[in-house]
Structure formats: structure tokens, C-alpha cells
Image (cartoon, grey):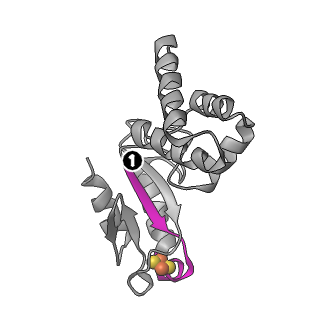
Amino acid sequence: MLEYEKNSLTEEIENLVKQYGSDRPALLQILQSVQRKHKYVSDFAQQEIARLLNIHPVEVYSVISFYSFICSVPKGRNIVRLCRTISCDMAGKENVESAVKRELGINFGETTSDKRITLEYTNCLGMCDQGPAMLVNDQVYTHLNPETAVNILNGIK
Ligand code: FES
């Protein structure tokens, strides 16, 4: 990260501290704001938040790890989440899982090198009678098989 980028991030976090305060409840609001704007909370941002709130960086990191909507590394433009809960598992999730990994050349928890797709697991999406189910950004797809899942992936820009 370049020096001017660091300075502007520090300034941004200082403004968030002014806006939300520097007590415990402010931490989550500050993290959410940084996440919304930058799509992740970098190591530097974490250090600055810890410094300005006068808490240990481990505390900042532990809040980030707790909430799935906040992340410490940049993700892809699209997030694909495959349900890994039991009904989808029994409905053939494993075949879909292998097919999407093969198609994208990445494992779950990883992002394609062109930043097009991040692959993740999710817990039950409430579509248990229509599994295997997968969430692509905000859209749910059901009754998947390896072929339909790969077709969906190929349709994502
Ligand atoms: S178990 Fe997959 S949607 Fe419920």
C-alpha cells in the first residue's frame, strides 16, 4: 500500500471514530463502514482501527473473523456460496462441489486470479427440499447438478 493511500485510510478511520465514537460498540460500525467502501479490511486498516480505539489488533481481528460479511482479504466481484448442510449434502452436494472446483481451478475459500469469483461454503439456505442449493451473490439456485452448476458459473461476469 502506498504512503498516500495509508494516509487517506488513516484519515477515513479518524473520521469514522469521530462519527461513531471510540467505545466498544463503535468497533463493529467502523469495520462495517470500511468493509462497505473497500470490500475488505486490510492489515493496515486493522492496525489503525486498533490504534485509534486503543485496543489490541487481535481484538479487531477476532471481530472480523466472527462476522462472515467482514473479511480481511479482498474477495472476488462475485461470491458463490454452496450449501454444505446435511440435506444438500445428501442430495448430491459433493458432485457439485467437485465440478465447481474443477471448473474454476480453485478450492473453497479461494478467489480466481481474475477476481471474478470467490468460492465459499454456507450453512442452510432454507431450500433443503430443493438441494443441492447455491447462492450466487443474492440469487439462490436449487436442484443443482454438476452441469447446471458449471453453466451458472460460466454465466457470471
Ligand atoms: S441444507 Fe442446503 S438449503 Fe438447507
Q: Which residue is mark 1?
A: 117
Which of 89/15 is in front? 15
Q: Residue at x 48, y 30 (%)?
A: 15
Q: Is residue 11 above or below residue 118?
A: above
x 53%, y 77%: residue:
89
What residue is shown at x 52% (from left), y 47% (from top)?
A: 29
Location of residue 73 (image quadrant): top right
Magenta residues (range): 78-92
Front-most of 56 and 84? Answer: 56
Q: Report the front residue among 142 and 67.
A: 67
Residue 61 lies left or right of residue 101; in this view the side is right
**Residue 152 spot, x, y in % from top left:** 29, 61
Which amino acid type is shown beneath numbered disc 1? Ile
Do we see residue 1 in this rendering?
Answer: no
Residue 157 in sight here: yes
Q: Is residue 6 left or right of residue 57?
A: left
Q: Is residue 93 above or below residue 16?
A: below
Q: Is residue 17 left or right of residue 150?
A: right
How many residues crowd around disc 1 within 10 Å: few (fewer than 14), some, or many (20 or more)?
many
Residue 122 screen position, x and y as percent: 51, 65
The image position of residue 117, as x and y in percent, is 39, 47
Depicted 88 relative to depicted 3: above or below: below
Residue 81 inside the magenta-drawn segment? yes
- Dot 1 falls on a residue whose secondary structure is strand
Residue 143 place in picture, x, y as percent: 35, 78
Is residue 57 highlighted in magenta?
no
